[in-house]
Each structure stands twice: as C-alpha cells, then as structure tokens.
Image: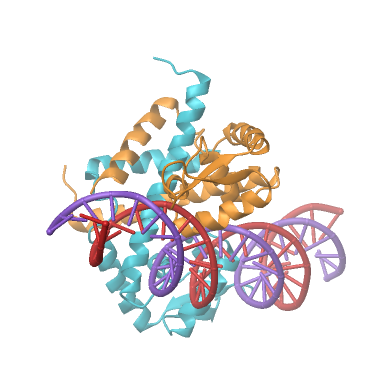
Chain colours: A cyan, B orange, C purple, D red
Amino acid sequence: MTTSPESQVIAERQLCGLVNGLAQRIAEHVRERAATLGLTASQATALREMSGPMTMRELAERMSCEPSNTTFVVDKLEKQRLVERHPHPTDRRAKHLVLTAEGTALRERLLELLAVDSPLSGLTPEDQRVLHGLLEQAVTRR
Amino acid sequence: MTTSPESQVIAERQLCGLVNGLAQRIAEHVRERAATLGLTASQATALREMSGPMTMRELAERMSCEPSNTTFVVDKLEKQRLVERHPHPTDRRAKHLVLTAEGTALRERLLELLAVDSPLSGLTPEDQRVLHGLLEQAVTRR
DNA sequence: TTCGAATCATTCAAGCTGCAAATATTTGGT
DNA sequence: ACCAAATATTTGCAGCTTGAATGATTCGAA
C-alpha cells in the first residue's frame, strides 16, 4: 500500500503535532513534580541530567537547549547551593559542574518523583523500546 | 524477557529526553522556515494549525499551549492582518478566528516550506505510521 | 612558533510561556 | 426564572529561551 505525496505531507504534519503534544505533557509532568521540591521545570531538567560532573555545553546538549540558557539555569541552581562551577581540569575555557551533597540528595528525590506515574506509562515496556528506536532514528538521521 | 523496575525507570527517562530532543528539533525547523516569512516560531505554529475558523481555546489545544498564550500570539498575527477575531456565531464569550486572504496565502507558503526536508524525513512512511500509533496511545492514555 | 579559526562560557535584548486573577457569558439544576 | 458552577478570553507577572555580540582560551596549519 502506498500513500500519495500529499497525504504523506499531512501525516508528517500531524506527527509533528503529536511529538510536540507529548513533549508538552512531559514538561508539564516535570513542572508539577519539580514544584513540590521548590524547583522550576528547567531547574529540575538540569538537575535530572546532571548524572555526573560535566561542562556547560554538555549539560546544554543533554537538555536540548542553547548554552546561554544553561548559564541562566545553572546560575539559579548555584544560588540554591545545589551545584558548583569548578575550573575544568584540562580546559581553562570550560567549567566543571558538580553537584553539592544537597544537590545530589535533591536529585535523588526528584528522580523518585518523576518516575511515579510518568506520561509514558501508557505504553508497555516493549512499546517503549520500539518508540525509543524510532525516535533515535529520527533524531540521528542526517 | 522482562526488565527490572530499575532499568525500566532509566529507559523511561531516556525516552523523555528523546521526545524532548525531537520536539526541539521540530521547533527549530519551524523557527528557521518561519523566519524566511518574517514570522516567529509560535506565530508560524498558530498559522499552521489554523486549517479553518476556530475559537481561541481550540487553537490553544491544537498548539498544545495555554489559552493565554494564544491571546499573545493571535494579537501579533492580528497586527499583521493575517487573522481576524470575529464574534462567535453562537457563543458570545468566544471569538471566531478567521484567516484573512493574506493569512491564507501566507499559510500556503508556510506549509510548503515546512514540508521540505522535515525533521521526520529520516523515517519511512511505514515507520511514521508506527510512531504515530505509539504517540497517540501515549498521549491518549489516562 | 605563530596567527587565524574554532570552541567555551557569559551577557543582553527580545520574544515565548504558564499560572493566577478578573471579566463576560453560558449552562444546568431547582 | 434564578443562581451557582462551568467555560471563554484576557491581563499581569514571573520565569524560560534563543540569537547575537563579547572575551577568554585552545587548536591546527603554515
């Protein structure tokens, strides 16, 4: 069964809407849980992605945002003493971000909250694997 | 084959990141094309979703954003004479949004631009159908 | 080695976004 | 018909995000 180019275009448009819709729903979920910890959504996202020491750029990539934005977010986290900017061991241009003890503890709590009743819980683990594969392919393709 | 609850949680987290990453990429694509028409990304998204007359709330739902945000965006589009707020035929609370001739023409051009080299072009039509199904299920589930 | 290009981070301006509150209108139960 | 609850939109505010410009540092080719 083939599809006309025309309906193919429409299908792609709908798909974009669905991706965006799900992303919004995930963001809302994060916002909601983050609020209970006194964090904004973007602060929580940053904290979630800080699985270990990394540079600003690395964090930006993990958060899928511009580096200038991570400057803004890390500023906030630093004011709350959740993360610290250390000099990078090998590159004096870069910063080495590390979580404080407080930051690590809060991150643990956050991850627990986020795991409960996630927006993806409507999908079986198997479906999630399929979805993962498709998204990876879509993102990777050049 | 079963997965431990622990790795399941991690997989879900990664999946959220992927969804967000793809959504960002789509947004960037829109931003890029919109700019060539003198539109911002959100203005373009609104225009794209205006397939016919609709209320503010309807537009908000299609854009996956808050109604207050559509007020902001429609204000801009109205200033550019691309859309008009008419009284709603049956509900005096609501507005009936309609594209002007200019708006309709610009929308056509926008759709053409967006269709070229979309971020989802890395997926076959069949893969896109599968993705569509999965996303719909994820979004629909309650 | 040296210099130009690339990379890391930051600042600033402009625009986007969600949330809570306010107004206007409609709806449903009595 | 009446009124409380629900709904549609807007406003104001606080926070988020991008893109361009800047300064510091590193990299690579001549």
Q: Vertical placement of A111 versus D30: above or below?
A: below
Q: Pinpoint residue D9: horizontal percent, then vertical percent.
A: 48, 55
Q: Quadrant of the N terminus of chain A?
A: top left
Count of all numbered marks drawn on residues in the image: 0
Q: Pinpoint residue B20: horizontal percent, then vertical percent.
A: 44, 52
Task: Using residue A16 as the reference point, say whether residue A22 is left or right of it.
Answer: left
Task: Using residue C21 as the reference point, say whether residue A119 is left or right of it.
Answer: left
Q: Pinpoint residue B111: horizontal percent, then vertical percent.
A: 59, 34
Q: Vertical placement of B107 versus A81: above or below?
A: above
Q: Write down the quadrant of residue A43 in the picture.
A: bottom left
Q: Vertical placement of A69 versus B127: above or below?
A: below
Q: Vertical placement of A30 versus B93: above or below?
A: below
Residue under the image location 32 percent in, 45 percent down: B139
Q: Pinpoint residue A141: horizontal percent, then vertical percent.
A: 51, 38
Regarding residue B18, the answer to whether it shows in the image is no
Regarding residue B62, the answer to whether it shows in the image is yes
Q: Quadrant of the C terminus of chain A?
A: top right
Pick the front one: B97 or C23:
C23
Task: Using residue A106 as the reference point, say whether residue B111 is left or right of it.
Answer: right
